[in-house]
Structures are given as C-alpha cells and as structure tokens.
Amino acid sequence: MTEHDQKELGNTLWAIADQLRGAMNADDFRDYMLSFLFLRYLSDNYEAAAKKELGSDYPDNKDEPNTPPLRLWYEGNLEDIEQFEAQMRRKVHYVIKPEYLWSSIAEMARTQDKELLHTLQKGVRYIENDSFESTFQGLFSEINLDSEKLGKHYADRNAKLCTIITKIAEGIAKFSTSSDVLGDAYEYLIGQFAAGSGKKAGEFYTPQQISTILSEIVTLDGQDPATGRKARLDKVLDFACGSGSLLLNVRKHLGPHGIGKIYGQEKNITTYNLARMNMLLHGVKDTEFEIHHGDSLLNDWDILNEANPAKKQHFDAVVANPPFSYRWEPSDAMGEDFRFKNYGLAPKSAADFAFLLHGFHFLGKEGTMAIILPHGVLFRGGAEERIRRKLLEDGNIDTVIGLPANLFFSTGIPVCILVLKKCKKPDDVLFINASEYFEKGKRQNRLREEDISKIISTYQFRKEENRYSRCVGMNEIVEKGYNLNISRYVNTAKIEETVDLASVHEGLVTLEEKIVESKEKHNAFLKKLGLPPLP
C-alpha cells in the first residue's frame, strides 16, 4: 500500500469519527473507534491464518456470501473445533469464535440485528479472557457499551452501534488488512485525536518525528555509534509508554525479529489499554511484549522491584517521554530506594530526574538511554544540580540535544533529549542545538526529514559544526558550574558584519556624482525640447 493510500485510510477513518461523534467528546469516541479497528485487525488476521491452516477444507461461502466461511466450517466440523483452536493458538497465539469476528459483527450491524449489542458484549469479554494464552483483562474497559452517550435505552444504543460499525466497515472495506497498514491508520488516528484533545494528548502520544530520533539513537551501537546499527536488542524498556508508539518505532527500526521482548509501563488505564491494543495491532505477538499498568516512580512492577542484584533486570535500550515537571510526593523511605540513594531525590515540584534515574538504573552496561525532558533539567539548581553533577562526574551523560519549541500537542515549550550511557568512550559531552531547524505549522511545528537526519548524523559521528554542535570537555562544564544550558556551549547568535564606514562614505560620494551627471544629461534633453529644466 502506498503512502497516499495509508493517508487516505487515515483520513477516511477520521472523517467517520468526525461525522458520527455526536454528543460524545473526542476522547470517548476515540476509544470506540480504535477498539473496532483493533477487532477488525484481529479478525482479518485470524481468518487469513485459518484459511491457510484449513487449506482445501476452508469453505466456499458463495451460496451464503454474508456468512463468514469460518462459521460454516465450525457448523460442519463440531468434533474438530477443539483440535483446530489448539493449532491456531500455536500458530497465531489467539482464537476468535466465528460469531465474534468483525465480519459477523459488521453483518449484524448492516442488517440492524437487535442482538448486536449483546453479541458485542459477549465478544469483548471473550477476547479479554479466552482468546489469548495471556489474559488481557480490561483490554476493552474504556468502551462502555452500556453508556447513555450511545443512547438512553438498549434499542437506541444498539441502533447507534449499528450505524458506527456499518460506517467503519464501509470506510475500510477497500483497504488492506495487513498489520502495517492498519497499524499506520491506528497511529494516524491517535495523532489526530491527540491534536484535537489538546493537553490531555501529551499523556499518550509522542510525535513520530521525535520518536524516530530516539529510536535511531538507541539502536546504534552504544560504545561506538559510528559503526552503525546493532543487529539485535534483547530487551527494550519504556517506563512511561503511553500508547506504545515509541516502543513500536524502535521495533520498526530493527525489524520484527530485531528485539527479543518489549517492556512498557503506563500509569493511565486508558493509555495502558491503548498500548496493549497497539502492540497486537502491529503484529507483535502476546509473548513478545509485556505492558504493566502501574506507577514507575513507585516502582510497583514486580519484575523491576527486585532487590537481589543478581536478578536485576537490565535493558539494552531505554526510551521515554515522561510527563514534564510532574509533581510527586516522595516518602522519606524513598531516599534509600536503590534507584535514588546514590543521587538524592528529585524535588517535589519536578519529578524529571526521578523518572530519568528510574530508567537509568535498569540500563545495561552496553546500552543506550534516550529520554525527552524540559530544558529546566539542564540548569536548575538545588537537588537537580546535585543529581546532574553526579551523572556528569560518573561520565554518564553522553549527549544533550535541544529541539525546537511547539513540537508537542500538550505543550509549546522547547524540550531536550538527554542521551545517557553506563559506559561511554568519549570523555566529553556532545551538545546539539537543533532549535532553529524545523518547519512551521499552524498548530504545531514539525521536524523535516533533513532535520532529523542532521541530528542523527551529528550524534552518530560526533560531528562539530559552527552554531549547531560542539563536543565540550568536563573542565569547561565544571567551570560553568555543571550547568548544561545549551546556549552556554553552542553560540547561535549570528555575528553582525563589521561596517566599513570609509567604504560606505566613498560609495555615497560616487552615487552623488552619478546623480549630478544624470541630472545634467536630463536637463540638456529638456532644453532641446524647449521645456524648463528640473530644479
């Protein structure tokens, strides 16, 4: 499918959302829209795998075109269903009963079947509890099929769902059902809803251009980025993963077999469910990812909260876009937490360094961490200065990248990317000031491909360029009080040209002489014509 087709699919789905939303706010309708798109992908993927598995036994539904072939097979092979489903669990890792397939649901919607709502409710429970080997409890918890926003009575809700599902089915019928295509459409919709819901969107969406920068950085060799991309990462972590788009971007850069397992953590229940759907929708098997619903600052995920150093998790890459300057309430005991005790606690007013230290603790020795933070972490004093100083003295801060303002849906402030490593070769810090390289947009600015490539290339080859990038030794950083404000090291002010007053004066004299000469010629012509001269 071409990029044009992908964009057309996204526009089609957004137009449907805009048309059908009615009394619902954008966030509520987003959950319905994305959930149905997810069901469509799961169903089509499952039916394609079933057709391949059954081969010539897969029924021809020419006589009953509105009945899914798989339903016909189930009706005629009752004694073989258990064995078939066991095989499907081995092949595609999940099972969907024929009555809950998107094709069945869409047909019920088309014919205004009065049992659609009941069937959907049973189907949702089945997918959450029985479809996968792992249970995905609460996967659809954000869509309330009994909500009065769909209608006050069952019949009204059923009719509304019939309309929504029919429109979606018609809109996406002509498009491919591959995970890449539907995955892109899913990402597009998340982005569109993010743009429409303002600040709240920052909770779940990292713009693709910034996501690409982080992904490119962490997939390059940690010790010597100039040697190129790593062949494989065993484990990747995003401890504030939102909808999972950043993790999926890392996977995209390495290919489907380039990562052993993806780990994500998300505090918000809505975005936690989005992330799980997003993984499955992009063809990531349930055994290839683990998303935890919990609070990273409290470190309430059992696999990370392991006191025994021998069992501690280490990740080859850590990426994150945590909430900016988040207010938190650290307890006294947290000062002894293994993540913070060597650095001290981040202030209550801004948990930025608490998030950073959480992720950094679990970074492997050869790994790379890239995290998006507000510029304040570079220069604020007090507890943050002490943490920054410790990281610098230990040689853990590798690169500081300043980005343009207004790239995010949730905030207009400029942000930076900090690249950290447990062990790094250069004994200096690379500063990149990319704040002036972007394309201005109506609501948000955006990074162009050439802007992204320039950042990546500068990081990879540690290039220095006047007014853009510079490698700075620790002596200079110490002299400046461990302040990492980029403008202290990379001067972006344009040098004004020196004005040569003598040369300017000479030019003015010459110009005056030409004016006099031209005026005399003009008056000579006027005299011949018998007209009065110019004064």
Image (cartoon, grey):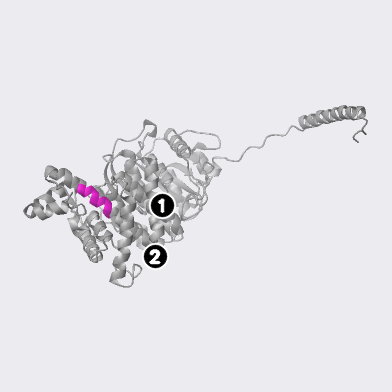
SS label for mark 2: loop
Q: Which residue is mark 2?
A: 24
Q: Residue furthest left?
A: 79
SS label for mark 1: helix
Quarter of the image that includes the C terminus:
top right
The answer to whether residue 364 is seen in the rendering is no
Quarter of the image that includes the N terminus:
top left
Majority secondary structure of the magenta segment? helix
Task: Check if residue 352 falls in the magenta segment.
Answer: no
Q: Residue at x 44, y 46 (%)?
A: 417
For the record, the magenta segment spans 39-47
Q: Which residue is mark 1?
A: 191
Q: Residue at x 37, y 53 (%)?
A: 13
User: From the viewer's perspective, is 456 left or right of 136?
Assistant: right
Quadrant hosting residue 97: bottom left
The x, y position of residue 451, in whole percent, is: 48, 39
User: From the viewer's perspective, is 503 left or right of 435?
Assistant: right
Q: Residue at x 62, y 38 (%)?
A: 494
Marks 1 and 2, the one that precedes in the sequence = 2
Q: Residue at x 21, y 49 (%)?
A: 46
The x, y position of residue 38, in whole percent, is: 29, 53
